Image (cartoon, rainbow, N blue to C red):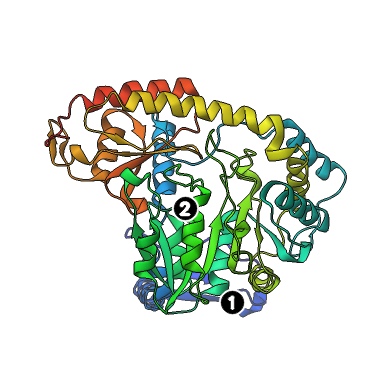
């Protein structure tokens, strides 16, 4: 017979009840006293509690190497700003390093055509041959660098390229030399590889450029990798060729020291600054891993496409990592990337139009912040960031808020009073300043600047500047 519905006997029910069995009709039924039923239920609860206790006893520890990683403060602030906007708070987000432009039409159309034409399958791990050949042509024509397709690895964004490069060349105990202010992920990538990040402070008075003497003073037998980013995130600084040559002369003295050159902002550069690829310097090709991509210059952040160019043994090592992590990049994105490289030298008119807008925004913000007392500015020569020294305001008391102690509390103050989201400098290894992304419409920046000025009027610098 089928099971009938059953409810637990209530306090007003009889002292016993009967359950039908699922045996044959002749098997009869089973009777329980109320006390017996409650006893069985109590046993069941004890067993469930024991199961929960056993689950809670599971070892939930995380790898020490992963536990040592710090979450990206840039992403955390961007997510916080998005949550506030969704809650109805009109926050202006100037934290994320993402162009506000749409991907150029010719690139987007190439991606859509890839879908229509069925180019939606796995590609070779290293990337399609047509894209790697196009990258080789680009590096030859624009950077003076000669590579073959087997010396190029296409990945899911430049971030993956850098991570794999660090993992491939660094061993536990090695040191990774990183000038500060730095992109937030560099030290964490070193830690993930078991290496030790060694931070080299720079000064706003030197436009945040690494001094060769500072580099020479920290190199040891453990030094394995120097990371350079030009144009720089977060400062917008561009290394002139002469300074890079001085750095190269020091690097050349240490056979074990490699250089990772992050050139993702290469095309976002403002006259008269000029970009120089580190691998193009005499004697540097063999020891340089060059990383570039499509996210910034071509407004393709969501397409997730970057590439590494380096001697074959380094590229092969990175390729092994990629083959076990993600395999090849999206086939659709690779078709779009090919179209991007076909726009012309340095991205053609599509990129130059965006760069012109970035420069207009930079000029506006530099003028505006120079009107604020107590701030120091190094005018960026590339990328789309300002790294502004607000340290003269540290120690100030603000009515209704409290003390501005450092870059983090300054950003909290501006988020609360001005409803503008910026990134504190301590995330980049320099607590004196904050990073402002001007990858936003000029009208948005004007609104943000007005709000920032109103908020900062509530604060008086505690020391003379």
Against 93, residue 314 (above or below) is below
Q: Is residue 83 visible?
A: yes
Residue 269 vertical position relative to residue 125 in the rendered view, above or below: above
**Of residues 329 and 6, which is closer to you in this image?**
329
Q: How far apart are the two marked residues, 2 and 1, measured between alpha carbons?
A: 95 Å
Residue under label 1 = 28
Mark 2 vs mark 1: give the one in front. 2
Q: Where does the image place residue 50, in percent across and percent down from the top left?
A: 37, 78
Q: Position of residue 355 (x, y in %)?
A: 58, 31
| Residue corresponding to mark 2 | 243
Q: Nearer the viewer, residue 420 or 249?
A: 249
x, y (%) of residue 376? 28, 36
Q: Earlier in the sequence, mark 2 or mark 1?
A: 1
Q: What residue appears at the point 40 percent right and 62 percent down from the top-left corner?
A: 9
Position of the N terminus by quadrant? bottom right
Rendering quarter of residue 67: bottom left
């Amino acid at each position: 017979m089928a099971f009938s519905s059953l409810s637990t006997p209530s306090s007003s029910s009889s002292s016993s009840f009967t359950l039908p069995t699922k045996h044959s009709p002749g098997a009869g039924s089973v009777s329980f006293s109320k006390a017996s039923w409650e006893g069985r239920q109590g046993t069941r609860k004890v067993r469930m509690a024991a199961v929960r206790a056993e689950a809670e006893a599971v070892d939930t520890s995380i790898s020490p190497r992963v536990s040592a990683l710090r979450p990206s403060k840039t992403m955390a602030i961007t997510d916080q700003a998005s949550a506030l906007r969704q809650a109805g708070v009109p926050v202006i987000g100037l934290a994320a390093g993402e162009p506000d432009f749409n991907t150029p039409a010719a690139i987007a159309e190439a991606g859509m055509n890839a879908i229509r034409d069925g180019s939606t399958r796995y590609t070779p791990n290293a990337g399609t041959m047509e894209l790697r050949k196009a990258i080789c042509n680009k590096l030859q024509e624009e950077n003076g660098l000669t590579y073959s397709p087997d010396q190029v690895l296409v990945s899911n964004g430049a971030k993956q390229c850098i991570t794999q490069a660090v993992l491939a060349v660094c061993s536990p105990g090695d040191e990774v030399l990183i000038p500060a202010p730095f992109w937030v992920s560099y030290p964490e990538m070193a830690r993930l590889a078991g290496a030790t990040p060694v931070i080299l402070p720079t000064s706003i008075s030197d436009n945040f450029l690494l001094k060769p003497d500072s580099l020479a003073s920290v190199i040891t037998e453990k030094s394995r990798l120097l990371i350079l980013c030009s144009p720089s995130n977060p400062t917008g600084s561009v290394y002139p060729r002469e300074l890079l040559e001085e750095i190269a002369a020091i690097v050349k003295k240490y056979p074990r020291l490699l250089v990772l050159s992050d050139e993702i902002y290469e095309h976002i550069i403002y006259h008269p600054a000029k970009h120089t690829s580190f691998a193009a310097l005499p004697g540097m090709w063999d020891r340089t891993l060059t990383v570039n991509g499509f996210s910034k210059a071509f407004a393709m952040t969501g397409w997730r496409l970057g590439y590494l160019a380096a001697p074959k043994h380094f590229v092969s090592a990175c390729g092994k990592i990629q083959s076990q992590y993600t395999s090849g990049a999206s086939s659709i994105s690779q078709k779009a990337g090919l179209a991007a490289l076909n726009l012309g030298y340095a991205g053609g008119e599509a990129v130059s139009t965006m760069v012109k807008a970035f420069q207009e925004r930079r000029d506006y913000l530099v003028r505006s912040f120079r009107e604020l007392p107590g701030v120091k500015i190094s005018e960026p020569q590339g990328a789309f960031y300002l790294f502004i020294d607000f340290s003269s305001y540290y120690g100030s008391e603000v009515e209704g808020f409290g003390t501005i102690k450092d870059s983090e509390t300054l950003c909290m103050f501006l988020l609360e009073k001005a409803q503008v989201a910026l990134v504190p400098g301590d995330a980049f290894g320099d607590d004196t300043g904050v990073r402002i992304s001007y990858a936003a419409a000029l009208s948005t920046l004007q609104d943000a600047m007005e709000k920032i000025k109103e908020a900062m009027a509530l604060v008086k610098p505690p020391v003379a500047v």
